[in-house]
Image: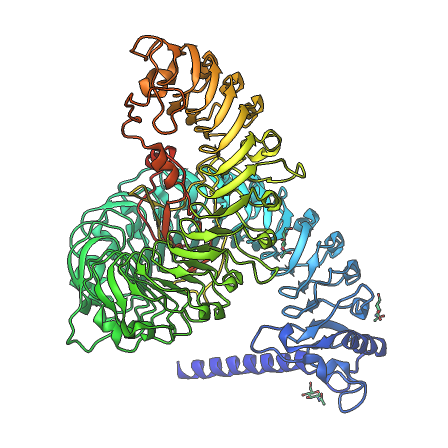
Amino acid sequence: MASYSFINFIFLFLLYSLHVIATVHTIMPPAVMLCHDHERSALLHFKQSLSLNESASGDSSAYSKTESWKARGENGTDCCSWHGVECDEKTGYIIGLHLNSAFLYGILGSNSTIFTLVHLQTLNLADNDFQSSTIPHEISHLSSLSRLDLSFSGFSGPIPTKLSKLFKLAYLDLSGNYLSGIFPVDIFHLPHMLVLDVGDNENLTGVLPEFNRTSSFKELRLSFTKFSGKLPISIGNLQSLTGLRLKACNFSGPIPTSITNLTQLTLLSLSYNKFSGHLPISVGNLQSLAILNLNDCYFSGLFPTSIANLTQLTYLSLSSNNFSKSRKISWLDNLTKLTYLDLNSSNIHGDIPSSLANLTQLAYLYLDSNYFTGEIPVCLTNMTHLIELSLSNNELTGPILSSFSQLENLEVLDLSGNNLIGTVEADIFFTHKKLEFLSLSDNNITFITHHHINFTIPTLRGLQLNGCNLREIPYFLKLKNNLEFLFLHENNIHGKIPYWIWNVSDNLEAVDLSSNFLTSIEHNLTVFSNKSLEVIDIGNNMLQGNLPVPPPNTIRYIVSNNSLTGDIPPLICSGMSLKVLDLSYNNMSGPIPPCLSNSLASLSLQSNKFSGTIPQLYSEDCDLEEIDLSQNQLKGEVPRSLISCKMLQILDLSDNQIEQTFPVWLGTLPQLQVLFLHSNKFHGALGSPRSPLEFPMLRIIDVSHNSLTGVLPVEYIKIWNAMKMNSPDTELYITTNIKFKTRSSIWGNPDLQSSITLVNKGVETEYKQILNILTAIDLSSNNFTGEIPESLGTLKELELLNLSNNELTGPIPRSLANLTKLESLDLSQNKLTGVIPQQLASQLTSLEFFNVSYNLLSGHIPQGSQFGTFDNNSYVGNSGLFGFPISKNCGTVHSPPADGDEGDSDDTYEFPSGFDWMFILAGVGSGLVVGYVMGNILTDGYPWLISSIAQSFACREKKQRRAKRSIIRR
Ligand SMILES: *[C@@H]1O[C@H](CO)[C@@H](O)[C@H](O)[C@H]1NC(C)=O
Ligand SMILES: *[C@@H]1O[C@H](CO)[C@@H](O)[C@H](O)[C@H]1NC(C)=O
Ligand SMILES: *[C@@H]1O[C@H](CO)[C@@H](O)[C@H](O)[C@H]1NC(C)=O
């Protein structure tokens, strides 16, 4: 027994020694074996054609391998001993070039001498920077190549079709480049191909071929490309396949059942495609699978319970598909090796099963955005391997268990958006040594902390306690920590904002204390000192005093809906990062500093007492997408320098004292969609455009309550094309597309998105985004004369048309009946004559408000559809109108309320009850948007439309009321 072991040992030792000798041989051939002169000079030419640049390689082990390549000196003649060069022992020809991560920098031209090394079997140039070189066709001269690795090397352009001439190729890696064009399909058919990786080439297109049975593929990696089409049934022929990575391509169609023949598969990733249909029931045959990634497709039907057979699974993601409602997830119980389980947004109802606790290896568990009810099972808090746990946006009830303190490895805990109740003591979380993100927002809980406790959560980076009945800012934050994001909006925090909050950590990036009862900022802060702060939202409080200057790195600064007084401090302009500034609804006064336009994308100063003229822009670079200066005391003219704001979408200058003729030059702003100029002193005619290309995007124009004269703008009606054409996306939002990223990304790649609150006419409604509601023209309360042009009927997208209170004459054109989307039509208080066209009644089926009162109309009131719902008030003051709903005798004259011209002024008249048009006009633009949208946290667009129009909003609001706010991960 003993001697056997000894012999065994000797044998193994010999084997080992042989192995060592062999290894040494390949790296360091015997000195006698010199390389061929022409190959040596080819290498030297290759070296000279490129430079070395440390930034060219990302790998930490990178070094400049070609530095040892020298014509003279110790290794001068033997290129086989140079770094990265491998020669054939017998022939001395170069068979391998291992120049990955070698700081190579420059263009790889088609004349590169590297293509003369025709004995090459391995060419590895990965992780260098070939500065957008295209891969030269000459690579096909290297006909012995079996391994080619050009990954992450800055190549661009198409993949040469001649690559498919390299018949010996077994391993091809072109991933992580900037390749475009169509992938040469013949490469799939190379007879020895084992591993093909072209992933991470975002503009590379292609389709999968029919695979035949002789295919030897082991790995196919196409993730993050634009490959499209269906998976061919013949994919089932790739019997040796162990890995199939198709994540984030454009594939569609069903998954062929044949895929379940691939019994060697250990990894299957199909997520982020447009795959649809039911998952094959036989998916349970893929018994080697360790990783199954099917999230974010359009799979439907029930979860195939045969997944329960995949007992080797460690990673399972099925989230965000269209699976049908399911109540049981007990099929999971067998998958005891799972460490990662994502069933987010999977339409699961019922209780969270206690049996989940059998999955003792689980480290990542996401069950958010389902319909789970009942209490959080106690056993969940025994799953001590958990690192991330999200149960957010369900319908869970009951208390937050104090046994959560057992989950000592937790880094992320998100229980937000449920119906959890009771008090939660901060102490629960003080045992967590790794907790980075905690969200308990939007439940019915009361979060309490004790002052005497000397504990904190030092690892905490994000804390979200919105709507948690906080009466003060959690005291434990006062101890030094690493907080980056602090969201405490909609609580009951009264009094001063404590000074220490701005300095709780050196990394603090975002603070949201909005919608509390805060009255002042401690120390009457004039300048925030924390340099890392990028987002400050203290809107919707009761803050008094002057505006503190945000730190220079701040991107979003929201102070709206407070009681601030005083000027805008000029120092604010030192913050060149500021993108969003919202000071609306305060009592601030003084002039608007011209420097404000420097970096801003969104400026909202609505409803203050700012005075003086609107300043000219400082520079020609204007990034402004939204300007709201409405409801102030601004004088003078609209500054012409706004013409450089090519991104401007929304301009609201209403309710000021601007005095000039209509600024026709606004027509040159290519993105302008919404223009509010009402309630100012604009005068003269609207005029006509200077080019048919003006106002290409305009959908809403409100110039009401001014002193404009002349005829209605027939020439503008011709060119307002956005009001004529159905926009391709009917749910289009007006978004001010402000994108920015915070320095660090936390929680993987989350999209933390809070809702926006729109306060309109006192009705508070929550939106995810503000709708691009209307196409509207409001020219009311001016002195326009002449007839209503027939051509108005071409603005087919119009939803609101208000021409009331002018001096218009002539008939109501029949063409208005073409405005079938019209919800509100007001022609009252003019001098219109003739009949109300019957077509209006038959075609305007969306009409909710109609007013032709106080004109000189006559004839029968049209009947039908919506017209049955309008009462007397729509028609009064027209002596010649008769029929339903006029109840009085024909001939009764009603006088208009104010500027009564030809009526009996004693005749009392009441405006339609419950609808105050004047109020609505005044309310145009009084919509207030506060809040924030954060992605990555802030990767996506954040929309906020300051302005809203008239009463049709109200019903839209109801229809489009959005779901409660949510944290959307991934
Ligand atoms: C010569 O080659 C040997 C073996 O590859 C290497 O260790 C040494 O650094 C080289 N010398 C020079 C000067 O490049
Ligand atoms: C390759 O061609 C370029 C011009 O196309 C030239 O500048 C370069 O010197 C050539 N390189 C070699 C190694 O001949
Ligand atoms: C891909 O194409 C788009 C559109 O042409 C372009 O904006 C983008 O820069 C391209 N990406 C790469 C990596 O070349």
The colour scheme is rainbow
Q: Position of residue 420 (x, y in %)?
A: 19, 52
- Asked whether, in this view, residue 531 is left or right of residue 82, the answer is left
Would you place residue 712 above or below residue 153 in this image?
above
Decide which of 398, 736 is in the foreground and name it: 736
Q: Residue 626 location, x and y as percent?
A: 49, 51
Q: Residue at the location (67% across, 69% down)?
A: 129
| Left-right relation of 738 to 493 | right
Q: Quadrant of residue 409?
A: bottom left
Q: Position of residue 291 (x, y in %)?
A: 43, 55
Residue 26 appears at what percent x and percent y? 67, 78
Which quarter of the frame holds ligand 3? bottom right
Res 827 → quadrant: top left
Q: Is residue 40 above or below residue 162?
A: below
Which one is in front, 857 or 317? 857
Q: Residue furthest bottom?
A: 74
Residue 380 in the figure: left or right of residue 10: left
> Could you say which is closer to the camera, residue 781 or residue 266?
781
Report the quarter where the C terminus lies.
Answer: bottom left
Q: Is residue 149 above or below residue 284?
A: below
Relative to 726, residue 198 above or below: below
Q: Residue at x 64, y 46 (%)?
A: 206
Whether residue 457 is visible: no
Q: Who's the residue at 77% across and 81% down the image?
A: 79
Question: How many callouts does the rendering have?
Answer: 0
Q: Quadrant of the N terminus?
A: bottom left
Q: Evaluate whether residue 605 shows in this view.
A: yes
